[in-house]
Image (cartoon, helix red, strand yellow):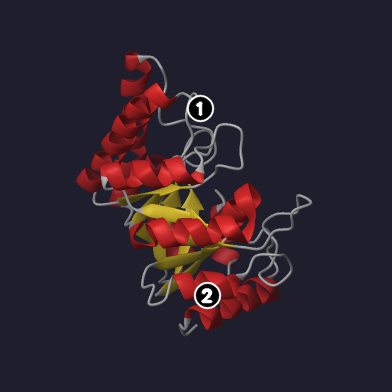
Amino acid sequence: MDIGVTVGDDLDRLAASPARFDFCELGVGEPTLVPDEVDPGRLTDALGGRDLLVHLPYSQRPASYVPEVNDAIVDYPRRLLTAAGALGAEKAVLHATSADRDDVAFRETAADQLRRVADVGREAGVEVVVENVGHQHAGLQLSVLGDLARETDTPICFDVGHAYMEGGNKAIRRFLRSHGDRISHLHCHDVRRRGDTHLPVGAGEVDYDLVASELDGFSGTVALEVFTDDAALLLDSAERVADRLGASF
């Protein structure tokens, strides 16, 4: 199991992040960091021997009601994923949002779009992992996301904090028991129900012992998504997660 850290879309922040992490997850897309415009040498220097994962644009919804728009939606990640693959990216995180998450009939379109983007990733040599954001207005609910990921054979990026915000520790348990076998990538941070999110692990209310018990033997990648540049806090969170999951760090 590899443990890494998210660094947003800033190459300087990437370079300054702790060298102990196995990989860094870098945000890509217009207007801030376009992967086909990144200097490969600068990226290599910033990574310092660590592996690269990317996060596709947060605001890009994978599915719309307009077929022509859906084609363009696929064309855009095709460009990003092709460039990211050429830079050596191994995985790409895609937010599971929709034009209307409550329209049951529309879920067929959402599934088709998810399948198309995942296929584009495979062509580029990048594993697309779909992330739960059901606590947000446009985010697909956990149960819907799990079913769509299974239907389309798409790996999941399970964001533990997002799941807690959607339905507490009970929601985390339900999802892991139903769809834990599809999880390839984890986003780990802590949260509080009052709205504090992306806290250091141990500072909130997520039951990471529960996560560990439901993901026994997990061998995927784990990204710390703690919103701080304090190396001590990042490394402490990584050590806490590694300890729970029975991994070394």
Q: Is 197 placed above or below 137 here?
A: below
173 or 85, nearer to the observer? 173
For residue 116, which quarter of the picture?
A: top left
Distance between the Cα atoms at labels 2 and 1? 43 Å
Q: Position of residue 62 (x, y in %)?
A: 41, 31
Horizontal placement of 82 versus 227: left or right? left
Q: Is 40 placed above or below 149 here?
A: below
User: What residue appears at the point 31 percent right and 57 percent down from the top-left corner?
Assistant: 88
Amino acid at dot 1: Asp
- Tag 1 secondary structure: loop
Horizontal placement of 116 versus 180: left or right? left
Q: Position of residue 48 (x, y in %)?
A: 45, 70
- In primary-sequence order, the first of circles 2 and 1 is 2
Residue 111 visible in the current orientation? yes
User: What residue appears at the point 40 percent right and 72 percent down from the top-left corner?
Assistant: 49
Query: What residue did someone put label 1 on?
Result: 102
28 or 149, nearer to the observer? 149
User: What residue appears at the point 54 percent right and 39 percent down from the top-left corner?
Assistant: 32
User: What residue appears at the point 28 percent right and 37 percent down from the top-left corner?
Assistant: 115
38 or 188, nearer to the observer? 188
- Tag 2 secondary structure: loop
